Image (cartoon, grey):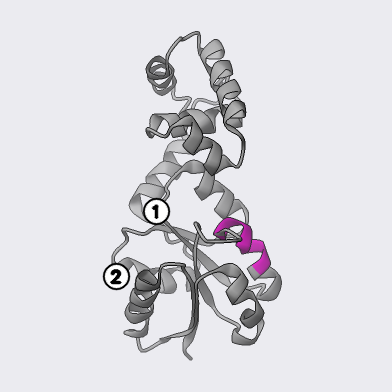
Amino acid sequence: MDVRVVIIEDDKVIRDAYRFFIEQQQSCKVVGAYPGVEAALPHLKALDPHVVFLDIELQGMNGVEGISRIKELVADVYIIMLSVYDSPHYVFTALANGASGYLTKDAGPEKIVGAIEEVLTGGGPMTSNIARMIVSSFQKNRESPLTKRETEILEFLSQGKTRTMIAQELFIDAETVKSHVKNIYAKLNVHSKADAIRKAKQNKYI
């Protein structure tokens, strides 16, 4: 039996590359490749894919939002996220929404192809940096004074993201981010981003 695969990725070069890698496997067949969730949805029920590779940053509906829509049409499908982002926000939201795996786009052809077999045999394929981040999240200090949102924002700051970038990624306005940062400084009793990051890491808040 061929494993039916659908690819939803807005970059045609990447989309075609994934198709090529996957179709080198005799047991796999790419039955559909689309630039966005909206383009794929009308076809998914008929295609009945076993596995969907789903990009996160798409025009229109993003990949994280698309997970539930796809599962409404094909309930038992395995969805493997593809992203340039390895932020906790994207990873945990995608997994909570029903994704079965999460690969960053620097994953090689072997990892992409291997993810299909892994997910079909009950595994949760992830690139090593994602796996490390998830393990690290369970090692965080549970006595942190920071809220989940404040922790998320401080993690973004530690990755070098600006307040504007954080606002865009979390779908909130920049003033809200500014307010959260002010609260973080107050709770950690610091007066700068560098001190907040240093203290949070020392205490395993992030």
Range of the magenta residues? 63-69
Based on the picture, tell me whether residue 109 belongs to the magenta stretch: no
Disc with the residue nearer the chain's start (1 vs 2): 1
Residue 162 in the image, given as x and y percentages of width and height? 44, 32
Q: 142 or 24, which is in the foreground?
A: 24
In the rendered image, the residue lying farthest to the right is: 72
Q: Is 60 placed left or right of 124 in the picture?
A: right
**Badge 2: residue crowd in 10 Å (few <14, some 14–19, many ≥20):** few
Front disc: 1 or 2 = 1
Q: Is residue 21 above or below residue 123?
A: below
Q: Which residue is mark 1?
A: 84
- Label annotation for residue 2: none
Residue at 42% across, 47% down? 86
Q: Secondary structure at mark 2?
A: helix
Q: Is residue 71 above or below residue 90?
A: below
The C terminus lies in quadrant: top left
Q: Is residue 20 above or below residue 147?
A: below
Residue at 36% across, 69% down? 14
SS assignment for the magenta stretch, majority: helix
Three-letter code, disc 2: Glu
Q: CA distance from mark 1 to mark 2?
A: 18 Å
Based on the picture, tell me whether residue 68 belongs to the magenta stretch: yes
- Label annotation for residue 110: 2
Residue at 31% across, 84% down? 24
Residue 166 in the image, given as x and y percentages of width and height? 50, 36
Residue 3 in the image, given as x and y percentages of width and height? 48, 84
Q: Quadrant of residue 195?
A: top left
Three-letter code, disc 1: Val
Residue 146 in the image, given as x and y percentages of width and height? 57, 22
Q: Secondary structure at mark 1?
A: loop
Q: Is residue 36 above or below residue 153?
A: below
